[in-house]
Every structure is written in C-alpha cells, then in structure tokens.
Image: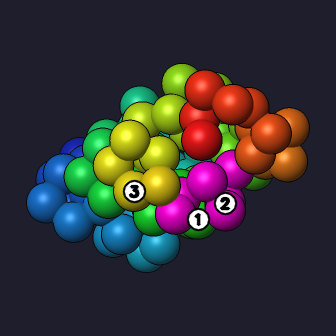
C-alpha cells in the first residue's frame, strides 16, 4: 500500500528496498526516499536512475548515490 510505504521511506529511505516494483517506479515516492537517504537510489526502478533531478537530490544527500545513477549522469559535472 502506497501510504504505508510513503510513511516508511519518510522515516527511513532505505525501506524502499521492501516496496513492490511498481512503487519503486513511483517518482514521487522514490524522491521522498532519496531525500531521506540518497542511497535509496539503488532500489529505484532503472528509468528513475536516469532522472537528473531525482539523482541530483540523491547525490545532495549522499555523494555515493552517484554509483547507482544511469551511466550518462555519472559523467554530468554538475552532479559530481
């Protein structure tokens, strides 16, 4: 249930790993998770790993999140 997962990732972003795949593709939900813990990007659906704004939020929270970004974003100088 989206509301339950929303509350979980607000408190602990890495709880995203327990979410169903459709929720891992929910941009708003994943954005909330990476704002709490940038490393939650690891569990996001692949298309979201190419979302520049979302990756930027993750990297702001934890620079190591860049490892899980899509390859083209890894070369983006603004993200590094």
Badge 1 vs badge 3, beta-carbon distance below 8 Å: no
Residue 59: give x, y in percent of width and height: 47, 46
24 left or right of 77 in image = left
Of 67 and 40, the residue lying toward us: 67
Mark 3 element type: loop
Q: Is residue 66 magenta?
A: yes
Q: Chief secondary structure of the magenta span?
A: helix
Residue labelled with disc 2: 68
- Choose the circle earlier in sequence order: 2 or 1: 1
Is the residue marked by circle 1 packed among few (<14), some (14-19), or many (20+) residues within 10 Å?
some
The quadrant in which residue 75 appears is: top right
Residue 3: give x, y in percent of width and height: 23, 46
13 left or right of 41 in image = left
How far apart in space, not on screen, are marks 2 and 3 (Cα)? 11 Å
Of 43 and 61, the residue lying toward us: 61
The residue range painted magenta reads: 64-69
Mark 2 element type: helix
Residue 41: give x, y in percent of width and height: 53, 56
Residue labelled with disc 3: 62
Query: Mark 1 or mark 3, which is nearer to you?
Result: 3
How far apart in space, not on screen, are marks 1 and 3 (Cα)? 12 Å
Is the residue marked by circle 3 packed among few (<14), some (14-19), or many (20+) residues within 10 Å?
some
Vertical placement of 75 versus 2: above or below?
A: above
**Residue at 53% from the left image edge and 58% from the top image edge:** 65
**Residue 26, can we see it?**
yes
43 left or right of 49 in image = left
**Residue at 54% from the left image edge and 24% from the top image edge:** 53
- Choose the circle earlier in sequence order: 1 or 3: 1
Residue labelled with disc 1: 42
Badge 2 vs badge 1, beta-carbon distance below 8 Å: yes
Query: Mark 2 or mark 3, which is nearer to you?
Result: 3
């Amino acid at each position: 249930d989206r509301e339950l997962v929303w509350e979980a990732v607000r408190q602990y972003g890495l709880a995203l790993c327990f979410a169903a795949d459709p929720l891992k593709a929910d941009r708003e939900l994943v954005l909330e998770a990476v704002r709490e813990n940038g490393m939650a990007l690891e569990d996001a659906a692949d298309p979201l790993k190419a979302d520049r704004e979302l990756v930027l939020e993750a990297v702001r929270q934890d620079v190591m999140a860049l490892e899980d970004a899509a390859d083209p974003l890894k070369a983006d100088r603004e993200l590094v």
